Image (cartoon, coloured by chain):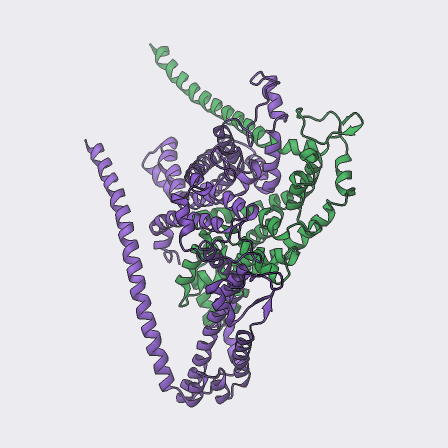
Chain colours: A purple, B green
Amino acid sequence: MEHIENKKNKKSSVISRFLSFFKNLGLGIVNGFINLGKKIKNGCTKFYKRFMDGSIGTKLSHFVMGVGNFYHKQFLKGLIYLSIQAGFLYLMITSPKVNNTPIGFKSLSNLITLGTEPGDFFTPTDNSMLMLLFGVIVLGIIGMFLMAYNSNIKSSYKADMDKRKNKKPTSFKEDIKSLLDERFHVALLTPAMIGVLIFTILPTIFMIFIAFTNFDKEHTAGLHLIDWVGFKNFADIFSGTGEISRRFLPVLSWTLIWAFFATTTNYIGGILLALLINKKEVKLKKLWRTVFVITIALPQFVTLLAMRSLLSNGGPVNQMLVTIGLMQANEPFEILAFASSPWIAKTAIILINIWIGVPYTMLMTSGILMNVPSELYEAAQIDGATKRQAFFNITIPYIIFVTTPYLITSFIGNITSFNVIFLLTGGLPRAAGGAIAGETDLLVTWLYKLTIEQNDYNLGSVIAIMTFIITASATLISYRRSKSYKEEDAFQ
Amino acid sequence: MMTTVKEPKQKKFRSVKAQKLTSTIFSYIALVILSVIWLYPILWIILSAFRVEYRDGNLVSTVVGHYFPKSFGLENFRILFANADGNNPFIQWFINTLIVSFFTFILSTLLTLSVAYVMSKIRFKARKKFLGIAIILGLFPGFMSMIAIYYILKSINLTGTLYALILVYSAGAGLGFYVAKGFFDIIPNSLMESARLDGATNSQIFTKIILPISKPIIIYTALLSFTGPWMDFIFAKVILGTNRNMYTVAVGLYEMMYGEQVSSSRFTIFAAGSVIVAIPIVTLFLSMQRYYVEGVTAGAVKG
C-alpha cells in the first residue's frame, strides 16, 4: 500500500513540477518585460539627470564625443573618443561598398528591403544575402558605438565628480593602470568577447534571420532577389507537402532515440567498465585504462572511418561472419550505409558509439571513484556494513549523484553530435519519403545537408532553430534544478 | 559430530576463497575480451598501413577480407609522401595542421583561462548575465553559424586560408570556460584576499598566485586546444573549401579516401596517413593522461 502511494506521490510531483516550470516560464517572460520597461525608464531618467547635472564639457559630450575629456585636460582620451565618433560617422554616411554592397546607413534600409534591383544585362542584381549580413553587422556596429557614446559621457561626468570632490581627474596612465587592477575583468574579457561577438553571436543572429526569408537553392544570392517570408518556413514543417514536412518528425524522433540510447549505453557501460578496472584484485590498472584511453586520443575521423571500412561489404568482419557460417558469401550483407533495414544501421551506430564513448565515461568515473569521501566508508564500517553493502549503498549512489549533471550535458551533446553519423553512414540508408534526409540522419546532419549540399539555407536555419528549442528546453528543465546553479557559491 | 560441524565451516571458508578466485578470473576474462574488442579496429588500421599485397602486378590498396596482411612493407607510406598525382600533399597538410594547432593552442588557452578566471573569481555587475548568455549560445548547433562565418571570412578574403581556421578555432574559446571555471572555483578566496592585503593588484594575483597553482587545468586546456585542429573535420572542410594545399590532415585524408576525385580504393594509404597523424597525438595524450582525467572529472562534477 505504502509503496503504491509513494509512486502516486512521485507521479503527481513530476506533473506539478512540469506545470510549475511552465508557470515560472510565463511569469519569467512577463517579469522580463516589466523589468525591461523599468530599466529603460531608469536609464532615461539617469541620462537626463546626468545631462542637467554635468559641467558644460559633459553637456557638449552628448553632441561631440570627447569634448568633456578635452575640457578636463584628458587629451589622449578625448582624442580616442573623437576619432571613434568621426570614424563611425564616416563609415555610416559614406557607406563604402564591399563586394558591390554598401555597408553603412544604407545597410539599414537594405536590411528591410533586401535589395530592390532585380538586375538586367547592364546592372548586377542586388546581393540580398550580403545585404542581410551587412545589415546585421551594422546593427552590431551601432550597438557598440552607443556603448562607446555612453562611456564617453560617463567618463566626463566622472571627471566632473572628481573635481567637485577636489580630486584630480584620472590621467590616461591611471586609466590604463586600473585595467590591471579594479577593472581587470574588462581587460581579460574584452578579447574573448570580441571573438564571440564576431564568430558566434553575429552569425547566429544572421542565421536566425535567414529562417524568415526565401533564401534557398532557387534564390541564389547575387542572381535573384531574396525576400522576407515571415513564418512560412516554419509553417512548411508542419503543414507543407515538401520533404521537410514529411521527414521532420521521423528525423526528430530518431534524433531523440539516438540521444537517449547513446547517452544511457555510454553512461552505464562506462561506469561498469570503471568498476571492473578499479576492482581491488585487478592488477595493472594503468595498463587496462590506457588500452581504452587510446580510443579517446585517436582522431574520430580515423576511428570512425576505420569502423566503416571494417564493417563494409567485403571487409574483415563480413569475411569472419562468412567463415563462421553466419552469412552466405554470395549474399553480401551490408551493415551501415546500405543496410537492407534502417534498424540494422541504427543498432550498429549505437553499438559503435559505445566503442567511441564508453572510455570517456570510464575515465571520468575512475576519477570520481578515487574521490569518494573516505568518511562515508568509515562511518559505514562502524555501523557494521559489509563491503558489498558499502558498495551498493555508498559507491554506486555517490557516482550517480555526482554524475547526474554530466548525464544531462551529454544528452544535449548527443543531440548535436555530428561526427558519428556523418562519418559512419552519411545519413544513409535512403529513406522512402525523402531524397535528402536518410534514415540515420540526425537534425544536425540534415542541417548540414540542407545548407552545405542543397543550398536551402532557410530550411537549414529552421532546423537549427528547432534543434535549439529542443536542447534549450532540456537544459532549462535540468539546469534550474541542478545543485551547481543553486549553490554556486557554496564552496567559496 | 565434531567433524560434521567442522566440515561446513571449512567448506564455507574455502568457498569464499574460491568465490574470490572465480571473480578475479572472470574480471580478467572480461577485461581481455573487452580489450580485444577495443584494440581490434585500431590494430587493423596499423596492419593495413603496412600491408603490401600485389594482384596482377598492381598494389592492392582496397579493403580486403583478411585481417592479417599476407606481406608487409612500407610501400603505402612511400606513395603517401610521394604525392604522385600532385593532389594529395600529405606533408603540406601535416605542416598546415601543426601551424594551425600551434596558434590555436596559444590563443585559445589564453582566452579560455582568462574568461574562466573572471567568471569564477571576480564579481562584477554583468556577471550573471554573461554566464546566461554563454549557456544559451552553447545550445545553438555549432555549425548553424558556419555559413555566416564562411561569408564573413569571404568578404574579407580569408576563406581557404589557415588564418581563417585559427581565428574560427580560437574565437569560440571564450565560450568553453566551464571546466576551467570549475577548477578556479575550488581555489579558496582567502588566498586572494591575503594577497590583496599585501597590496597585490588583480592582475598580479592572477599571474603570480593563481596561474602557478593551476598547472593541471592549464595543461588540460592546452591539450584540448592543441589536439582540436587534428581532430576537427567539419569546420575545416567548409572553410577551406577546395583549396587542397591548405587542407589539414583530417580534411585531406577524408577527401583522399571519399572525395569526388578518387574512389575508396586508397584505403591502405589512408591507413598509413592515419598512423602518422595518430603517433604524435596519442603519445601526447597518453603522457598527459593524468591532467586529462583531472579535467574531465572536474568538468563532470561541476556540470
Residue B198 appears left or right of B50: left
Image quadrant occupied by the N terminus of chain B: top left
Residue A87 against residue A129 in the figure, above or below: below
How many numbered discs sit on the rendered protein? Answer: 0
Residue A306 appears left or right of A487: right
Q: Position of residue A16 (x, y in %)?
A: 24, 45
Residue furthest right in the image:
B57
Instruction: Give the quarter of the image for residue A75.
Output: bottom right
Q: Position of residue B190 (x, y in %)?
A: 43, 63
Instruction: Give the quarter of the image for residue A317.
Output: top right
Residue toward you, B86 or A474 = B86
Q: What residue sits 37% from the left and 34% below the top?
A: A392
Residue A57 appears left or right of B240: left
Residue A114 against residue A211 in the figure, above or below: below
Residue toward you, B112 or A322 = A322
Residue A278 against residue B54 in the figure, above or below: below
Q: Position of residue A22 (x, y in %)?
A: 28, 50
Q: Position of residue A476 (x, y in %)?
A: 36, 51
